């Protein structure tokens, strides 16, 4: 294979590939039906032309037959009148019209055959076009369904790997983080509140105990003062209580 043959082969193969890629089943089917309908129109015109020609030939044949019969009657009239010359002329005219009629008859038979063939072809083409339209609608529906399925599958595949899904995942992670922070803040707020109430409760116990001890100490100091010698009674009662209270406070602070 020469260089130019190889180049031609490459060009043809590339062109065929481009044509194959450019072929849209719906458009090709639609155009095919349109072409068939145009062929049907042309065939109908051909059938109409053939029928018209057949009718003209039939008229010419009938006219030739009529003329031949007329010359036959004239020949008979001339014979009856004893005019052989005129009878021969009439018979000659009759023969000419008979020959024309025979020729037209052969042509008419041929035209009849052609018209019948064209009519059968017309009926067959109409049937094929009707079948083609049905198949076209079915194939177009299947092509549309296949394209829709392909587009849907492509969309599903793109969604599975696209940035949109990644964005959803990021937003879900952020929502989880917000929920975790909110829950932690609620737990911290509850813990702080519990600790405050615990302090209040513990403080109340200490104050109650302090008051009880004060009351006990004050009662004990009065009894002791009644039993102390006169020398000790000179110490002011409040000073002694305050001193003991300070000692108790020191003990409580060390607890």
Image (spheres, rainbow, N blue to C red):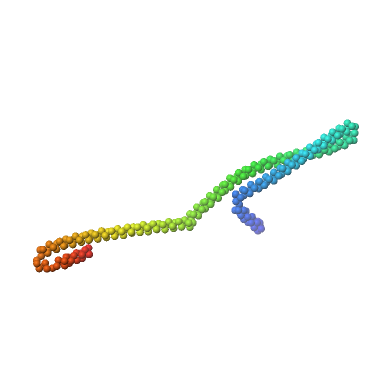
Nearest the eye: 107 or 68: 68
Q: Picture quarter containing residue 209?
A: bottom left
Question: In the image as oriented, which residue stretches furthest toward the top?
Answer: 80
Quadrant where the C terminus is found in the figure: bottom left
Q: Position of residue 31 (x, y in %)?
A: 63, 49
Quarter where residue 245 is shown: bottom left
Residue 77 is left or right of residue 136, and the answer is right
Give the residue at the far left of this rendering. Answer: 229
| Position of 50 relative to 21 (above/below) | above
Q: To which quarter of the image does residue 175 belong? A: bottom left
Q: Is residue 94 visible?
A: yes
Residue in the image at 39% along x and 57% along y:
179
Residue closest to the eye, 198 or 17: 198
Q: In the rendered image, which quarter contains the N terminus? A: bottom right
Q: Is residue 88 left or right of residue 228?
A: right
Q: Is residue 107 visible in this depiction of the protein?
A: no
Q: Residue 199 at what x, y percent from top left?
A: 27, 60
Which of the two residues, 252 or 148, is positioned nearer the viewer here?
A: 252
- Residue 146 place in picture, x, y as percent: 55, 49
Q: Is residue 112 above or below residue 11?
A: above
Residue at image coords 64%, 48%: 34
Q: Position of residue 216 (x, y in %)?
A: 16, 61
Rendered residue at 89%/35% (across/down): 86
- The total number of labels drawn is 0
């Amino acid at each position: 294979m020469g260089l130019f043959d190889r180049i031609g082969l490459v060009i043809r193969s590339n062109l065929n590939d481009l044509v194959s890629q450019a072929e849209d089943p719906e458009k090709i089917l639609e155009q095919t039906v349109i072409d068939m309908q145009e062929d049907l129109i042309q065939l109908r015109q051909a059938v109409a032309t053939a029928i018209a020609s057949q009718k003209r030939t039939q008229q010419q044949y009938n006219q030739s037959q009529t003329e031949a019969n007329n010359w036959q009657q004239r020949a008979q009239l001339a014979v009856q009148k004893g005019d052989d010359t005129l009878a021969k002329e009439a018979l000659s005219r009759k023969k000419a019209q008979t020959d024309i009629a025979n020729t037209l008859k052969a042509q008419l038979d041929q035209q009849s055959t052609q018209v019948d063939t064209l009519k059968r072809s017309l009926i067959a083409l109409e049937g094929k076009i009707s079948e083609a339209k049905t198949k076209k609608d079915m194939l177009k529906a299947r092509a549309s369904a296949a394209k829709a399925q392909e587009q849907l599958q492509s969309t599903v595949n793109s969604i599975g790997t696209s940035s949109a899904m990644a964005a959803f995942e990021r937003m879900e992670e952020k929502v989880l983080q917000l929920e975790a922070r909110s829950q932690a803040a609620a737990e911290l707020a509850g813990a702080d509140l519990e600790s405050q109430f615990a302090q209040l409760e513990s403080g109340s116990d200490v104050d109650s105990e302090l008051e009880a001890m004060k009351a006990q100490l004050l009662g004990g100091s009065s009894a002791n003062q009644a039993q102390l010698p006169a020398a000790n009674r000179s110490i002011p009662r409040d000073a002694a209580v305050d001193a003991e209270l300070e000692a108790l406070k020191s003990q409580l602070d060390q607890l």
